[in-house]
Amino acid sequence: MRLRQPRGTVLHLSHFCLFVHSYVSFAISVHTMKSFGVLAGLAASLPFASAIPAFPGAEGFGANAVGGRNGEVFVVSNLNDAGAGSLRDGLSKPNRVIVFAVGGTIHLASRLVCPKSTTILGQTAPGDGIATYGDGWSFSNADESIVRYMRIRMGKGGTSGKDASTLAEGENMIFDHVSFTWGRDETFSISGTASNITIQDSIIGQGLETHSCGGLIQTDGGVSLFRNLYIDNKTRNPKVKGVNDFTNNVIYNWGGGGGYIAGDSSGKSSANIIGNYFISGPSTSVTAFTRGNENFSGFVLDNFYDSDKDGSLNGKALGASSSNYGGMVLATTKFNYPAPAKVLPASQVVDAVLGKVGASKVRDAVDTFLVNEVKSFGKSGKLISDEKAAPMSYDPAALKGGAKPVDTDGDGIPDDVERQIGSDPNVKDSLKKAASGYSNIEVWANSLVA
């Protein structure tokens, strides 16, 4: 198992300036619907020697995943479970950037498996965005993959004993603004020889009873968990072994199995636990941290716990005492793991996380429900066994598809956007590199959620 800092974390100043200039200019152009004269060279290939983040704002151990930018573009053109133009078809080969010409819910007859070097850009879907429902995903061995703005909703009908999302091996992956719900085992687990993984700005919620687990984070290879929401999971919110950075997360309405579970076994673990906010809900009957031992070392700072369930956010700081952290050994020095560019004080974390967590370009009814539960500050929340029953009463058809964009050359970038950036809608140039080092299609996709 390997632990290393993300590749290329130091950029030459000239390259960094090129990146900032090209990306900001592009975002302004698309936003204002003006011509793209300031970066007329977007469609031209330019050399860029240094590593770049997976996307602007990518952080942590998985920040520099490459994805499919050196491969080909695949456009998901329908909501079918399989066949030409389906998401499953898009995942049949590695080295792809997957974008969506259709929005709505894809009903899965079996699990999806993500191959290596895959970029999945859910924010490109029209309408309310995209969801998969009915079974889960495997990201095991999906090295160098990037997943953004997806809804991965497994459900009671999914494969028994399986996670909504599982990652047992592989390296250099990042999950950003993903909504994971309704796993039948864990909701999102990372284990085995996995290394250099980030989950950021994502929801991990409502693992289904009778198991109802957020997830195992069990690898020596380094996992970053930044600005996520764990909600309505009976236990494992998360359960951590190995190397972990747990910063600026919100944890709500865990059950009797526990909130953050610290190790609970042999094997050395070391974690930064910084600026998190734990809020008890109706199902909560145990403290925020449990089951630490002498093998688990945690550097803890500025973590809050609101335990009174009184409808107001009025938590108190957890003092730096081993008893407040489940009996783990408290480290005196922060572990040298790749940190967020900005670490928020715990007093600001709840508002910041709830404002944009999950597939929030268009927030669907499920995520809206979960966010509103947190805002009840102890009054609402439930562990569920069936997503179709109350209180969720899930309706997959509620996710609206929107209008399919016109894309004459089929390169994944709509014609109107190509005209704005000075590209040719009749020439497939979406994988040509911009001055920033990102491909044209990535620059466009990044601008949609800038």
Image (cartoon, rainbow, N blue to C red):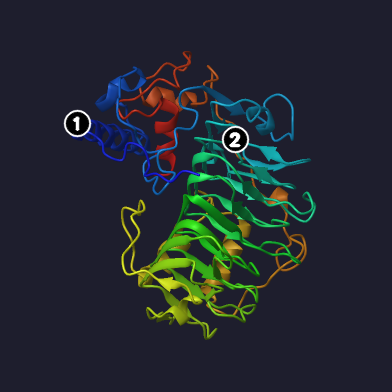
Q: Which residue type does callout 2 highlight?
A: Ala
Above or below, 190 relative to 284: above
Q: Which mark is residue 14?
A: 1
Q: Which mark is residue 146?
A: none
Numbered disc 2: secondary structure: loop
Mark 1–mark 2 distance (CA, rounded to whole Å)? 40 Å
Q: Residue furthest top?
A: 427
Does the residue at mark 1 contact the one at mark 2 (Cβ under 8 Å)? no
Q: As drawn, is 297 to the left or to the right of 112? A: left
Above or below, 372 relative to 97: below
Nearer to the camera, 164 or 242: 242
Residue that numbered label 2 is attached to = 403
Q: For mark 1, does the 10 Å Cα neighbourhood hold few (<14), some (14 to 19), or many (20 or more) residues?
A: few
Nearer to the camera, 295 or 261: 295
Q: Which residue type does callout 1 highlight?
A: Ser
Q: For mark 2, does the 10 Å Cα neighbourhood hold few (<14), some (14 to 19), or many (20 or more) residues?
A: few
Above or below, 59 relative to 294: above
Nearer to the camera, 99 or 37: 99
Q: Position of residue 16 (x, y in %)?
A: 24, 35
Q: As drawn, is 17 to the left or to the right of 239? A: left
